Image (cartoon, grey):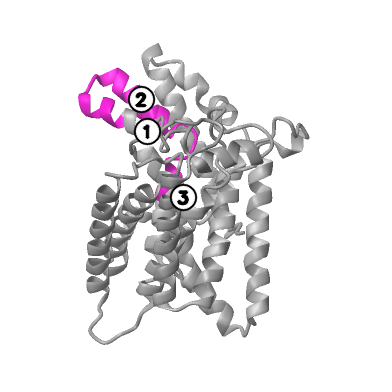
Amino acid sequence: MKTNHDRLLSLDTLRGFDMFWILGGAAGIWHELAQLTGWPVLHWWSTQMTHCEWEGFHFYDFIFPLFLFIAGISFPFSLEKSLQKGLSKKALYWKIIQRALVLIFLGLVYQGLLNFDFAKQRYPSVLGQIGLCWALAAIIFINTGWKGRIIWCAGLLVFYWLLNRFVPAPDFPGAPVFTPEGCFTCYLDRTLIPGTTYSSPLYNGGFLFIPAISTALLGMFTGAFVKIKKAGLTQTKKAGYMAIAGVVLVLLGLLWSLDFPVIKKMWSSSYVCIAGGLSLLLFALFYWVIDVCGYRRWTLFFAVIGLNSITIYIAQAIINFGFTANFIFGGAIHLFPDTWQLLLSNLSCIMVCWCFLYFLYKQKIFIKV
């Protein structure tokens, strides 16, 4: 079952679900609820809304790879439309490269390019990594069959593991290889990439595109599988097979983590498997509930976000939604006790963001890259 725009509603809903956690104030809501209630489960979830310092896996470490995975799912559908229009391979390459360049540019703008302070500019970005990894995965996808794609996906992960396992960082001799100091790809980042770093002098994030290509490929495998039309392969069976594949990937990641720890900032191969497996499980659930069982009424809130996901990501850097929320709701919020005001402010900010996206949705304005 698809939307009127020939789109998988489950995919738009999942994309919106993912972006919801990035909206301003989403993390703060859970922190404030934990403080107000004192409930242990909310304190636990509040910690899940933060990134691990290095090794480990929190829910918030799942947001970025899920978005890249979702971008991968979309590609087989857009590729089919492009081929139906008669686009040549050369035209496809140019279309892929254009999208990657636009995302890289938007990522630079998001991180302050227009300030023209190039010494403090952070060059690697979330959007840049999505654009680069998606583009490289797309080129692999259109030039290989299932076997070749699997070889590329697995090969990149194994290569990245072996590279970091057996090539230590030369500027920190003796440091463990799976640490910020000893990691070879972190060494490449801090020595070759100009500008400022992401979270410490030891980490920048530029060469993480190597294993992240596999994250995008996993999404493309999923999209291609959903598109298969074969007698006996029902939508219910597809959801089941995807769920099984997701469990297998998670188990593989846990097993791999015994030698190559789960490290988001390093985008370790075990992290790719666990995040990819969880992404596949979540998509299988959304696909089964929405497209197979037809439970759609609850999807509007997330679909509105998902249909303009890049828009809201960039808009939050340009538009002060917090100011607007305070202008509209600030007076009413100050009628509540002080302990509730921050929570209500965060909720009002999310409400304003969503209303902005709903306005675009009603006007059928969908800004795509």
Percent across and percent down for residue 7 are 45, 68
| Disc 1 from disc 3: Cα separation | 31 Å
Percent across and percent down for residue 14 are 39, 55
Q: Assign a secondary structure to mark 2.
A: helix
Circle 2 residue: 31
Residue 34 visible to the viewer: yes
Please give the count of numbered marks on the rendered protein.
3
Q: Amino acid at mark 1?
A: Met
| Disc 2 from disc 3: Cα separation | 39 Å
Q: Which mark is residue 163?
A: 3
Circle 1 residue: 49
Region of the chain picked out in magenta, as a range = 17-45
Pick the front one: 159 or 141: 159
Q: Residue at the location (41% across, 29% down)?
A: 53
Q: Which mark is residue 209?
A: none
Pick the front one: 286 or 140: 140
Residue 5 visible to the viewer: no
Q: Assign a secondary structure to mark 3.
A: helix
Label 1 crowd bin: few (<14), some (14–19), many (20+), radius 10 Å: many
Image quarter of residue 205:
top right
